[in-house]
Image (spheres, helix red, strand yellow):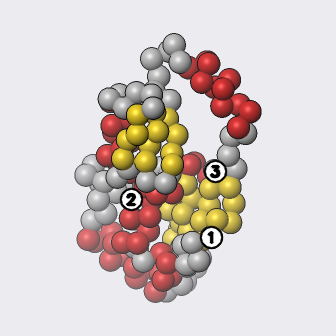
Amino acid sequence: MKYKVLVLDLDGTLTNSKKKITDYTKKILLNLQKKGVHIVLASGRPEYGIWPIARELELEKYGGYILAFNGGKIVECSTKKTIFERTIEYSYVQEIYEQVKDKKVALLTYESDSLITETPKDFYVEKESFINKMKIKGV
């Protein structure tokens, strides 16, 4: 096989409008992996929100990767080890908060299987919760 790696965006590319992979696409991707192609799922989503798709495509079995947070974290699926991670320095958090708190923008962060936000009823927070199958914790 000519290609060794296939990098796929999720929302609107790999998944349809219902956030599902079609049976045809799944079949093709499983066959590619059997031929030695490694799949990388690339998304702005958090790692937690990508794992269900990774499991559906059997990336743990075939040596695929998760590229979460728009490249901020890369996980090797077979070992579940983080091989790269870059986060915002904690010292910037207060400054970011001060800049957006009066702008009617939902600020959120992730913790395990939850979204943490001051605006749990915000449309975009609820959408993020739905897409990633994460609980919302209001603070």
**Circle 1 is placed at which residue position?**
81
Vertical order, 75 against 123 (above or below) = below
Spatial distance from mark 1 to mark 2, Cα to Cα?
24 Å
* Residue 46 place in picture, x, y as percent: 50, 51
Q: Quadrant of residue 65?
A: bottom right
Which amino acid type is marked by label 1? Answer: Lys
- The C terminus - image quarter: top left
Q: In the picture, which quadrant includes the N terminus?
A: bottom right
Query: Along the horizontal axis of the image, is 12 left or right of 108?
Result: left
Q: Position of residue 120 (x, y in %)?
A: 37, 32
| Residue 72: mark | 3
Dots 1, 3 in contact, CB < 8 A: no
Cα distance between the residues tagged 1 and 3: 14 Å
**Which one is in front in this view, the residue at disc 1 or the one at disc 3?**
1
Q: Residue furthest top?
A: 102
> 49 or 111, which lies in front?
111
User: SS for tag 2?
Assistant: loop
